[in-house]
Image (spheres, grey):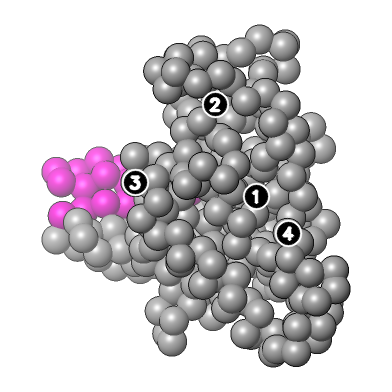
Amino acid sequence: MTCSAKPLFPALSLIFPGLVARHSGLLVRHFGLAARFPGLLVRLSGLAALLLIVGCSGPKDIYSQLRNADLVFVRSGGSAMDDAISDATASTDGRGDFTHVAIVQRQDDSLFVIEALPMRGVIRRPFAEFAAENGDSLLCFRRPDPAVIRDIAGRQGVSEDMLLWAFVQRALSRLGEGYDYIYLPDNGLCYCSELIYDSYIDTAPSPGDCHLFCSAPMNFLAPDGTLPDFWKELFELMQSPVPQGVNGTNPNDMFRDPILVDVPGL
Protein backbone atom coordinates (compact mmCIF):
# COMPACT_ATOMS: atom_id res chain seq x y z
CA MET A 1 0.00 0.00 0.00
CA THR A 2 1.29 3.39 -0.94
CA CYS A 3 -0.86 6.06 0.65
CA SER A 4 -1.20 9.44 -0.89
CA ALA A 5 -3.16 12.48 0.17
CA LYS A 6 -5.67 13.59 -2.44
CA PRO A 7 -6.34 17.31 -2.14
CA LEU A 8 -10.06 17.95 -2.04
CA PHE A 9 -9.61 21.70 -1.87
CA PRO A 10 -6.50 22.53 -3.94
CA ALA A 11 -4.67 25.67 -2.90
CA LEU A 12 -7.08 26.38 -0.07
CA SER A 13 -5.74 29.02 2.27
CA LEU A 14 -8.23 31.07 4.27
CA ILE A 15 -7.56 33.40 7.16
CA PHE A 16 -10.26 35.13 9.19
CA PRO A 17 -10.15 36.57 12.69
CA GLY A 18 -9.77 33.57 14.95
CA LEU A 19 -9.85 31.12 12.07
CA VAL A 20 -7.05 29.44 10.19
CA ALA A 21 -7.64 26.96 7.39
CA ARG A 22 -4.66 25.10 6.08
CA HIS A 23 -4.62 22.47 3.37
CA SER A 24 -2.24 19.61 2.89
CA GLY A 25 -3.73 17.20 5.27
CA LEU A 26 -6.45 19.67 5.91
CA LEU A 27 -6.62 21.20 9.31
CA VAL A 28 -9.00 23.99 10.27
CA ARG A 29 -9.06 25.47 13.75
CA HIS A 30 -11.57 27.88 15.17
CA PHE A 31 -12.17 28.83 18.77
CA GLY A 32 -15.66 27.86 19.77
CA LEU A 33 -16.42 25.81 16.68
CA ALA A 34 -16.31 22.15 15.76
CA ALA A 35 -17.82 20.74 12.59
CA ARG A 36 -17.25 18.05 10.01
CA PHE A 37 -17.37 18.36 6.23
CA PRO A 38 -16.22 15.95 3.50
CA GLY A 39 -12.43 16.00 3.51
CA LEU A 40 -12.30 18.78 6.08
CA LEU A 41 -11.23 18.76 9.69
CA VAL A 42 -12.51 21.56 11.87
CA ARG A 43 -11.05 21.60 15.34
CA LEU A 44 -12.18 23.44 18.41
CA SER A 45 -9.97 24.03 21.39
CA GLY A 46 -10.46 20.83 23.37
CA LEU A 47 -12.69 19.23 20.73
CA ALA A 48 -11.81 17.53 17.47
CA ALA A 49 -13.92 16.23 14.64
CA LEU A 50 -12.02 14.16 12.15
CA LEU A 51 -12.50 13.04 8.62
CA LEU A 52 -9.22 11.81 7.27
CA ILE A 53 -7.86 12.30 3.81
CA VAL A 54 -6.20 8.96 4.02
CA GLY A 55 -5.35 6.12 1.96
CA CYS A 56 -5.60 5.31 -1.53
CA SER A 57 -9.26 5.72 -2.26
CA GLY A 58 -10.38 8.93 -0.59
CA PRO A 59 -11.99 9.83 2.75
CA LYS A 60 -12.91 6.98 5.06
CA ASP A 61 -14.69 6.64 8.35
CA ILE A 62 -11.78 4.89 10.00
CA TYR A 63 -13.67 4.40 13.25
CA SER A 64 -15.56 1.53 11.64
CA GLN A 65 -12.43 0.03 10.07
CA LEU A 66 -9.87 -0.17 12.86
CA ARG A 67 -9.59 -2.86 15.52
CA ASN A 68 -7.39 -3.76 18.47
CA ALA A 69 -3.67 -4.03 17.67
CA ASP A 70 -3.85 -2.26 14.31
CA LEU A 71 -0.93 0.09 13.78
CA VAL A 72 -1.00 3.68 12.62
CA PHE A 73 2.13 5.10 10.99
CA VAL A 74 2.81 8.83 10.76
CA ARG A 75 4.87 10.47 8.03
CA SER A 76 7.58 12.97 8.86
CA GLY A 77 6.27 16.25 10.20
CA GLY A 78 9.48 18.13 9.44
CA SER A 79 10.85 18.56 12.98
CA ALA A 80 14.58 18.22 13.62
CA MET A 81 13.98 14.81 15.15
CA ASP A 82 11.78 13.71 12.24
CA ASP A 83 14.43 14.85 9.75
CA ALA A 84 17.14 12.94 11.61
CA ILE A 85 15.01 9.77 11.68
CA SER A 86 14.19 10.17 7.98
CA ASP A 87 17.84 10.66 7.03
CA ALA A 88 18.78 7.44 8.80
CA THR A 89 15.82 5.16 8.02
CA ALA A 90 13.79 6.38 5.02
CA SER A 91 13.37 3.78 2.31
CA THR A 92 14.31 4.14 -1.31
CA ASP A 93 11.42 1.99 -2.56
CA GLY A 94 8.77 4.70 -2.35
CA ARG A 95 6.97 2.97 0.51
CA GLY A 96 7.03 5.82 2.93
CA ASP A 97 8.94 8.20 5.11
CA PHE A 98 7.51 7.32 8.52
CA THR A 99 8.88 8.69 11.76
CA HIS A 100 6.29 7.51 14.30
CA VAL A 101 4.05 4.52 14.94
CA ALA A 102 1.28 3.90 17.49
CA ILE A 103 -0.98 1.02 18.52
CA VAL A 104 -4.76 1.18 18.11
CA GLN A 105 -7.03 0.21 21.00
CA ARG A 106 -10.77 -0.14 20.54
CA GLN A 107 -12.89 0.02 23.69
CA ASP A 108 -16.59 -0.39 22.95
CA ASP A 109 -17.38 2.49 20.59
CA SER A 110 -14.29 4.50 21.53
CA LEU A 111 -10.93 4.45 19.79
CA PHE A 112 -7.56 5.18 21.41
CA VAL A 113 -3.89 5.00 20.56
CA ILE A 114 -1.04 3.83 22.78
CA GLU A 115 2.28 5.39 21.88
CA ALA A 116 5.70 6.43 23.14
CA LEU A 117 6.42 10.13 22.68
CA PRO A 118 9.39 12.37 23.48
CA MET A 119 8.73 14.45 26.61
CA ARG A 120 5.63 12.35 27.44
CA GLY A 121 6.79 8.75 27.46
CA VAL A 122 4.26 5.96 26.98
CA ILE A 123 0.72 7.34 26.93
CA ARG A 124 -2.83 6.41 25.93
CA ARG A 125 -5.09 9.04 24.39
CA PRO A 126 -8.17 9.34 22.15
CA PHE A 127 -7.55 8.58 18.52
CA ALA A 128 -9.26 11.81 17.45
CA GLU A 129 -6.73 13.84 19.46
CA PHE A 130 -3.84 11.87 17.97
CA ALA A 131 -5.12 12.31 14.41
CA ALA A 132 -5.80 16.02 14.84
CA GLU A 133 -2.32 16.59 16.23
CA ASN A 134 -0.81 14.85 13.23
CA GLY A 135 -3.13 16.56 10.78
CA ASP A 136 -0.35 17.68 8.46
CA SER A 137 1.09 14.19 8.20
CA LEU A 138 -0.42 11.38 6.24
CA LEU A 139 -1.56 8.55 8.46
CA CYS A 140 -1.25 5.03 7.11
CA PHE A 141 -2.70 1.91 8.68
CA ARG A 142 -1.47 -1.69 8.76
CA ARG A 143 -2.28 -4.75 10.84
CA PRO A 144 -0.75 -8.15 11.61
CA ASP A 145 -1.44 -10.66 8.85
CA PRO A 146 -4.71 -12.46 9.76
CA ALA A 147 -3.20 -15.79 8.67
CA VAL A 148 -0.35 -15.34 11.13
CA ILE A 149 -2.73 -14.29 13.90
CA ARG A 150 -4.92 -17.32 13.17
CA ASP A 151 -1.92 -19.64 13.41
CA ILE A 152 -0.62 -18.16 16.68
CA ALA A 153 -4.09 -18.09 18.25
CA GLY A 154 -4.60 -21.73 17.29
CA ARG A 155 -1.33 -22.81 18.88
CA GLN A 156 -2.08 -20.81 22.03
CA GLY A 157 -5.63 -22.15 22.22
CA VAL A 158 -7.21 -18.67 22.32
CA SER A 159 -9.45 -16.69 20.01
CA GLU A 160 -7.91 -14.26 17.53
CA ASP A 161 -9.58 -11.36 19.35
CA MET A 162 -8.03 -12.49 22.64
CA LEU A 163 -4.60 -12.65 21.03
CA LEU A 164 -4.91 -9.13 19.60
CA TRP A 165 -6.10 -7.90 22.99
CA ALA A 166 -3.03 -9.50 24.60
CA PHE A 167 -0.81 -7.36 22.35
CA VAL A 168 -2.71 -4.24 23.45
CA GLN A 169 -2.51 -5.26 27.11
CA ARG A 170 1.28 -5.56 26.92
CA ALA A 171 1.43 -2.03 25.56
CA LEU A 172 -0.93 -0.77 28.28
CA SER A 173 1.33 -2.33 30.91
CA ARG A 174 4.05 0.10 29.80
CA LEU A 175 2.00 3.25 30.45
CA GLY A 176 4.00 5.80 32.40
CA GLU A 177 7.42 4.63 31.24
CA GLY A 178 9.74 7.37 30.08
CA TYR A 179 10.82 7.93 26.50
CA ASP A 180 14.04 6.15 25.51
CA TYR A 181 16.26 8.92 24.15
CA ILE A 182 19.30 6.64 24.00
CA TYR A 183 17.56 3.87 22.03
CA LEU A 184 18.82 0.91 24.00
CA PRO A 185 16.86 -2.29 24.71
CA ASP A 186 15.70 -3.44 28.13
CA ASN A 187 16.52 -0.24 30.00
CA GLY A 188 13.07 0.52 31.46
CA LEU A 189 12.44 3.19 28.83
CA CYS A 190 10.69 2.99 25.49
CA TYR A 191 10.72 4.61 22.04
CA CYS A 192 7.80 4.35 19.62
CA SER A 193 8.63 1.27 17.55
CA GLU A 194 10.21 -0.43 20.57
CA LEU A 195 6.79 -0.35 22.25
CA ILE A 196 5.32 -2.28 19.32
CA TYR A 197 8.26 -4.69 19.14
CA ASP A 198 7.94 -5.57 22.83
CA SER A 199 4.14 -5.87 22.75
CA TYR A 200 3.63 -8.19 19.79
CA ILE A 201 4.95 -11.50 21.11
CA ASP A 202 4.08 -15.09 20.31
CA THR A 203 3.90 -16.99 23.60
CA ALA A 204 2.69 -20.26 22.08
CA PRO A 205 4.49 -23.42 23.21
CA SER A 206 6.16 -23.72 19.81
CA PRO A 207 8.20 -21.73 18.91
CA GLY A 208 7.24 -19.80 22.04
CA ASP A 209 8.03 -16.30 23.28
CA CYS A 210 9.28 -14.82 20.05
CA HIS A 211 8.74 -11.33 18.71
CA LEU A 212 6.48 -10.97 15.70
CA PHE A 213 8.59 -8.13 14.32
CA CYS A 214 12.23 -8.25 13.28
CA SER A 215 14.93 -6.14 14.84
CA ALA A 216 18.10 -5.15 13.01
CA PRO A 217 21.29 -3.16 13.61
CA MET A 218 20.28 0.47 13.97
CA ASN A 219 21.61 3.23 11.76
CA PHE A 220 21.84 6.86 12.85
CA LEU A 221 23.97 8.10 9.96
CA ALA A 222 22.73 10.20 7.05
CA PRO A 223 23.05 8.77 3.51
CA ASP A 224 26.40 10.57 3.11
CA GLY A 225 27.78 8.73 6.16
CA THR A 226 27.77 11.71 8.51
CA LEU A 227 26.03 11.90 11.88
CA PRO A 228 23.25 14.52 11.78
CA ASP A 229 23.67 17.37 14.27
CA PHE A 230 20.44 16.35 16.01
CA TRP A 231 21.84 12.95 17.00
CA LYS A 232 25.24 14.38 17.85
CA GLU A 233 23.75 16.95 20.23
CA LEU A 234 21.22 14.50 21.70
CA PHE A 235 23.72 11.79 22.62
CA GLU A 236 26.20 14.35 23.95
CA LEU A 237 23.42 15.75 26.14
CA MET A 238 22.48 12.25 27.32
CA GLN A 239 26.18 11.44 27.89
CA SER A 240 25.65 8.21 26.01
CA PRO A 241 27.42 6.77 22.96
CA VAL A 242 25.52 6.65 19.68
CA PRO A 243 24.11 3.07 19.52
CA GLN A 244 25.12 2.66 15.89
CA GLY A 245 24.83 -1.04 14.99
CA VAL A 246 22.93 -2.02 18.16
CA ASN A 247 19.83 -4.08 17.36
CA GLY A 248 16.64 -2.07 17.40
CA THR A 249 13.63 -1.01 15.34
CA ASN A 250 12.26 1.99 13.49
CA PRO A 251 8.87 2.91 11.96
CA ASN A 252 10.02 2.59 8.34
CA ASP A 253 11.37 -0.93 8.71
CA MET A 254 8.30 -1.90 10.73
CA PHE A 255 5.95 -0.55 8.07
CA ARG A 256 7.62 -2.78 5.48
CA ASP A 257 7.78 -5.87 7.70
CA PRO A 258 6.09 -8.81 5.91
CA ILE A 259 4.17 -9.64 9.11
CA LEU A 260 1.91 -6.65 8.33
CA VAL A 261 -0.82 -6.27 5.71
CA ASP A 262 -3.01 -3.38 4.64
CA VAL A 263 -6.14 -2.59 6.62
CA PRO A 264 -9.03 -3.38 4.25
CA GLY A 265 -10.72 -0.26 2.98
CA LEU A 266 -7.99 2.14 4.10
**Residue topped by disc 4:** 211
In the displayed structure image, the side of residue 265 where residue 103 appears, left or right: left
Q: In which quarter of the image is residue 100?
A: top right
For the residue marked with disc 4, what is the amino acid? His
**Residue topped by disc 3:** 120
**Residue topped by disc 1:** 4
Q: How far apart are marks 4 and 1 (CA)?
A: 30 Å
Determine the secondary structure under disc 4. strand
Q: Quadrant of residue 141?
A: bottom right
- Whether residue 237 appears in magenta in the rendering, the answer is no
Q: How far apart are marks 3 and 1 (CA)?
A: 29 Å
Which residue is nearer to you in this view: 106 or 193? 193
Q: Which of marks 1 and 2 is nearer the N terminus?
A: 1
Q: Distance between the residues labelled 3 and 2?
A: 20 Å
User: Which callout, 1 or 2, points to the residue nearer the camera?
Assistant: 2
Q: Earlier in the sequence, mark 4 or mark 1?
A: 1
Magenta range: 14-31
